[in-house]
């Protein structure tokens, strides 16, 4: 079928022409949501502010360290610089990551049904597209700033960094952020209100951390991950521990995704 | 009537929707829709039209009952079924920061259409709906008319077999409304169409079937002709032009006629209700002769009963007056 306008321009008419059988790409809707949401997220003021503030903090902290070396002659190790930076980046980022994750689905409430879910996409595909886009955007921002900090430390400070160890440390921190995002997207799919979602996510962050510390030692402890960072950056890391943290975060991610997806598939939009 | 389920485009059975145990939006709706039908969904505000459409498209889950589209039960995850449906919501809203091209491309990708198919199709649709000049502009600045055109293009991007348009003429100027009606007529020749509208003249012009909802309940579902056949007959309006004395004399003569049950005059408009068994043609002819005798000029004569609006109002009125007997599908006859 083809559509054409008449000479009057306003009145529509239809012209028949048999189109060839169209082969539908079943995963295209998922990719469309993922791509659109990733682009939208990295263009949002929240993501840009987060990355800009992190880069400014990275440069500012480096300038301070260089100043201490030049003025007082105190030798500044790149590993020390990076450890403190990554720690503060995680603490400072949580607020903005919480906002990014908790608003992923609920903030789209106005157009969600009209424009997206009434088309050829399932709720599961939509949820997964959103989750993966937000995880991608958060990890992209985190690794971007991490790599910049690593390069600056390596060039301007005492070279005691182990590149592999830096990536291990960032991977561990990244795994924690992935868990946080998956909790956020779940809250966003369950709750209609973004502000309530943010509040619930904060409760999960604090309550989850406290709960984890009370659980058996077989499960990774946030404090341990925190304390291991300086050693990992210097190259004293254990891949088994990284695997344990990654698997733990993956399990949390899968569980929260399942809960979120099942609930989202059953609710009215 | 199609016998096999697969032959039906839409079938609902005891479809009921209760929101959070607080509001009964739809109550026991059972209907069947065959291919090629143009169904007009009628009902007052809050009658349950949009809820029904949202259940049919899988945006809402039924509290009880089911809706089958193309023979399969519609659920929120029925992406394959929705690929065959083109939907326009009431007051369509669009994502921010998109142009018609990027928006239609996004929508086509949501339908899983490959690049070679979607790009030419969106280009022809943008041209067809007259948005070629605004194809690079942000949708946020679009007027109601432009938004409606974009919504039409979106609903056709997947070349659907079933179109579900929820109040498509809402907020349109007369010219845009006329275009929309012409489009619906054209599309109705090859697709199945469900149109919800407040504007009964639109339904009258476009649809061949009607479903009437009143407070969440389906009170009529069938052909538009049958709906018109249910309304009060022998109800006419005559527009007159004459002095007060002549009109007064005419009114007296008309009221004296055996065929006329009641006659009322208001602002030079004579409203006539003929008796049930009366031959309307004879009765109208008698009235015309009286007009001639009284030297009253005839400006116009029309049958009020031939309008869908009247039929709709009659149906709703009948449903309202049924009271508790609405509990029964076939109300028990009263004892003599």
Image (tube, rainbow, N blue to C red):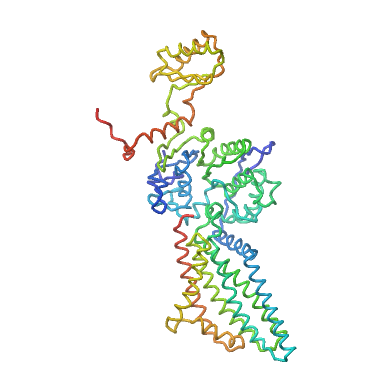
The residue nearer to you, when weighing A250 against A107, is A107
Q: Is residue A142 left or right of residue A252?
A: right
Where is residue A161 shown, x and y percent of the image? Answer: 65, 87
Q: Quadrant of the C terminus of chain B?
A: top left
Where is residue B309 shown, x and y percent of the image? Answer: 48, 31
The residue nearer to you, when weighing B162 against A169, is A169
Where is residue B26 shown, x and y percent of the image? Answer: 41, 46
Residue found at x 59% / y 56%: B109
Residue found at x 48% / y 82%: A220
Identify the residue at the far front of this view.
Answer: B244
Identify the residue at the far left of this view.
Answer: B335
Can you say whether B316 is above or below B246 in the image?
below
Can you say whether B194 is above or below A70 in the image?
above
Q: Quadrant of the N terminus of chain B?
A: top left
Residue found at x 50% / y 55%: B79
Q: How many marks?
A: 0
């Amino acid at each position: 079928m083809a559509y054409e306008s008449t000479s009057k321009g306003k009145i529509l008419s239809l012209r028949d022409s048999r189109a060839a059988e169209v082969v539908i790409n079943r995963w295209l809707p998922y990719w469309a949501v993922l791509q659109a949401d990733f682009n939208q997220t990295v263009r949002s003021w929240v993501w840009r502010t987060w990355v800009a503030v992190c880069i400014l903090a990275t440069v500012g902290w480096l300038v301070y360290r260089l100043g201490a070396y030049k003025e007082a002659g105190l030798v500044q190790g790149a590993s020390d610089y990076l450890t403190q930076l990554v720690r503060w980046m995680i603490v400072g980022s949580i607020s903005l990551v919480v906002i990014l994750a908790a608003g992923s689905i609920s903030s789209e409430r106005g157009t969600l049904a009209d424009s997206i879910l009434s088309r050829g996409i399932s709720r599961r595909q939509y949820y997964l597209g959103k989750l993966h886009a937000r995880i991608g955007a958060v990890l992209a921002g985190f690794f971007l700033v991490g790599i910049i900090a690593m390069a600056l430390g390596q060039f301007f400070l005492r070279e005691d960094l182990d590149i592999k160890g830096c990536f291990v440390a960032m991977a561990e921190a990244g795994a924690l952020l992935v868990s946080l995002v998956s909790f956020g997207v779940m809250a966003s799919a369950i709750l209609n209100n973004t502000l309530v979602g943010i509040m619930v996510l904060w409760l999960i962050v604090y309550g989850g951390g406290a709960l984890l510390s009370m659980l058996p030692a077989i499960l990774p402890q946030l404090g341990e991950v925190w304390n291991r960072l300086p050693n990992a950056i210097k190259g004293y890391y254990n891949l088994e521990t990284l695997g344990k943290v990654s698997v733990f975060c993956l399990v949390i991610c899968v569980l929260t995704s399942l809960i979120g997806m099942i609930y989202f598939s059953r609710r009215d939009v | 009537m199609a016998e096999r389920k697969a032959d039906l485009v839409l079938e609902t059975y005891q479809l009921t929707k209760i929101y959070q145990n607080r509001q009964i939006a739809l109550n026991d709706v059972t209907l069947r829709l065959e291919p090629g039908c143009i169904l007009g969904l009628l009902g007052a505000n809050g009658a349950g039209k949009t809820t029904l459409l949202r259940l049919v498209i899988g945006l809402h889950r039924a509290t009880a009952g089911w809706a089958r589209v193309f023979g399969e039960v519609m659920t929120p995850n029925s992406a394959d079924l929705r690929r065959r449906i083109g939907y326009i919501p009431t007051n369509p809203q669009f994502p921010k920061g998109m142009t018609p091209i990027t928006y239609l491309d996004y929508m086509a990708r949501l339908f899983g259409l490959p690049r070679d198919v979607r790009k030419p199709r969106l280009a022809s649709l943008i041209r067809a709906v007259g948005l070629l000049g605004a194809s690079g502009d942000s949708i946020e600045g679009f007027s109601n008319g432009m938004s409606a055109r974009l919504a039409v293009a979106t609903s056709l991007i997947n070349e659907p077999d079933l179109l579900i348009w929820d109040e498509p003429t809402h907020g349109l100027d007369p010219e845009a409304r006329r275009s929309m009606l012409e489009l619906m007529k054209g599309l109705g020749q090859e697709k199945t169409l469900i149109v919800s509208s407040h504007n009964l003249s639109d339904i009258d012009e476009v649809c061949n079937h009607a479903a009437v909802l009143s407070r969440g309940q389906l009170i009529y579902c069938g052909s538009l002709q049958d709906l018109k056949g249910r309304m009060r007959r022998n109800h006419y309006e005559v527009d007159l032009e004459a002095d007060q004395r002549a009109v007064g004399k005419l009114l007296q003569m008309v009221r004296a006629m055996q065929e006329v049950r009641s006659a009322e005059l208001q602002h030079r408009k004579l409203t006539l209700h003929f008796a049930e068994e009366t031959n309307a043609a004879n009765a109208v002819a008698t009235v015309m002769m009286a007009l001639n005798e009284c030297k009253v000029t005839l400006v116009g004569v029309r049958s009020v009963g031939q309008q869908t609006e009247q039929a709709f109002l009659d149906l709703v009125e009948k449903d309202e007056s049924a009271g508790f007997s609405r509990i029964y599908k076939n109300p028990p006859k009263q004892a003599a």
